[in-house]
Image (cartoon, helix red, strand yellow):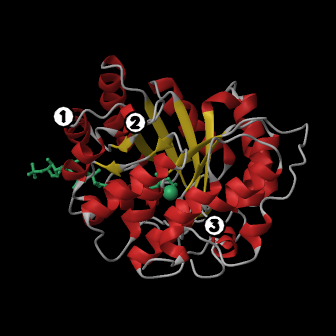
Amino acid sequence: MSGDPRTTGTAEPGVLALGLPDPVPDPSLPTRVRIHEVGPRDGLQNESALVPVEVKAEFVARLAGAGLRTVEATSFVHPKWVPQLADAEDLMPRLAGLPGRHPGLRLPVLVPNERGLDRALAHRATDVAVFASATETFARRNLNRSADEAMAMFDPVVARATAAGVPVRGYLSMCFGDPWEGPVPAAQVIGFGVRLLEMGCAELSLGDTIGTATPGQVTALLAGFARAGVPMARLAVHFHDTYGQALANTLAALRSGVTVVDASAGGLGGCPYAKSATGNLATEDLVWMLHGLGIETGVDLAALAATSGWMAGQLGRPSPSRTLRALLGGSA
Ligand code: HMG
Ligand code: MG
């Protein structure tokens, strides 16, 4: 496929040739953002076709090569629940050399319970994440237990990982809307979020799992966390783009002082246990906006676009990312 923009990143005449517009900073925004890339995990967990482990390893390596320094690699969940990531044991050794080649690279993995943590530690994971739910229905569907029982399941995971020097990220899903329960009260979200932080999670990622949130809700929820005494430095945002709101919601979060944003290369993603969850905010869309605002990310956008274009070719379907399609001349 030599010369194919999906594999080489070569753009047809057009947007990429013009380059990014001159950055115009906004003084109300941070000067640097850390992107938490979730494509290999949140993206690939939702693919109907199994992606070969060699392709996953190359995907992670190429994302690291494009400058992403946090790349969530896989999940040590029950293989029957998420067969797409059942090859976690096979993938990890293939990634072992990457942090040496890319200083500062972190490759977190999801672990739901102690069994998952044991598997992750056996494969020398240096960062793990637990994933809670702000609603009862999603806790039962995603974790097979109540929201409180799920918290009890995470408690020893967080304690043991932290004692082993492995930082834990806490995800909280359904922070805005839930497909079964409707709007989720902010107090309920803040309650679970504070519990995850008090449990010992170093960072809390607030998930709009089904992408229904709008910017005012984001600002209000973050203000609620601030009133509860949570510093913005401990929060991250995780927007799915189902209703096209992810970028606007991100801007609202940045204005509130958040500096860690989750995104997925090419906009891959979804959750197999959340009705109507589609892809995450596309990393390309995020980087285009951040670089346009003069915000540093460390990401090489052309290399990232080439990677996502290549992945779209591997998956055999176009990427939903507007920026990627523009950069690759519509052939992504
Ligand atoms: P369960 O069936 O209740 O598990 O599933 P259990 O504790 O009763 O154990 C049953 C058997 O499973 C036992 O085996 C365990 O050893 C085994 P047996 O003794 O019968 O032979 N088992 C495991 N095996 C391998 N690895 C493990 C594991 N755990 C138990 N980790 C469980 C409970 C949590 C395991 C299951 O519900 C599960 O794996 N759920 C994961 C679902 C998932 O991965 N969802 C997607 C990620 S969340 C997401 O995408 C949202 C996010 O992106 C944020 C957002 O967008 O909002 C993060
Ligand atoms: Mg997600």
> Which amino acid type is shown beneath numbered disc 3?
Asp
Q: CA distance from mark 1 to mark 3?
A: 35 Å
Earlier residue among tags 2 and 3: 2
Q: Residue at x 47, y 82 (%)?
A: 317
The answer to whether the residue labelled 2 contacts the one labelled 3, judged by CB atoms less than 8 Å apart, is: no
Q: Nearer the viewer, mark 2 or mark 3?
A: 2
Element type at mark 2 = helix
Q: Dividing the picture into quarters, in which one does residue 189 lie? A: top right
Rendered position, 329 above or below 29: below
- Where is the N terminus found, in terms of image quarters? bottom left
Q: Local crowd at mark 1 within 10 Å, few (<14), some, or many (≥20)?
A: few
Does the residue at mark 1 contact the one at mark 2 (Cβ under 8 Å)? no
Between disc 1 and disc 2, whose residue precedes?
2
Q: Is mark 3 within 8 Å of ligand 2?
A: no
Q: Residues within 10 Å of mark 3 (few under 14, many from 20)?
A: many
> Secondary structure under badge 3?
loop
- Displayed quadrant of residue 44: bottom left
Name the secondary structure under disc 1: helix
State whether residue 179 is above or below residue 88.
below
Q: Which mark is residue 215?
A: none
**Left or right of 168 in this view: 50:** left
Question: In front: 128, or 101?
Answer: 101
Name which residue lies at 37% across and 31% down.
100
Which residue type carries mark 1? Ala
Q: Which residue is mark 3?
A: 241
Camera-side residue: 15 or 68? Answer: 15
Total numbered labels placed on residues in the image: 3
Which image quarter is the C terminus in? Answer: bottom right
In the rendering, at what x and y percent does residue 147 appear? 43, 47
Residue that numbered label 1 is attached to: 122
Q: Which residue is mark 2?
A: 101
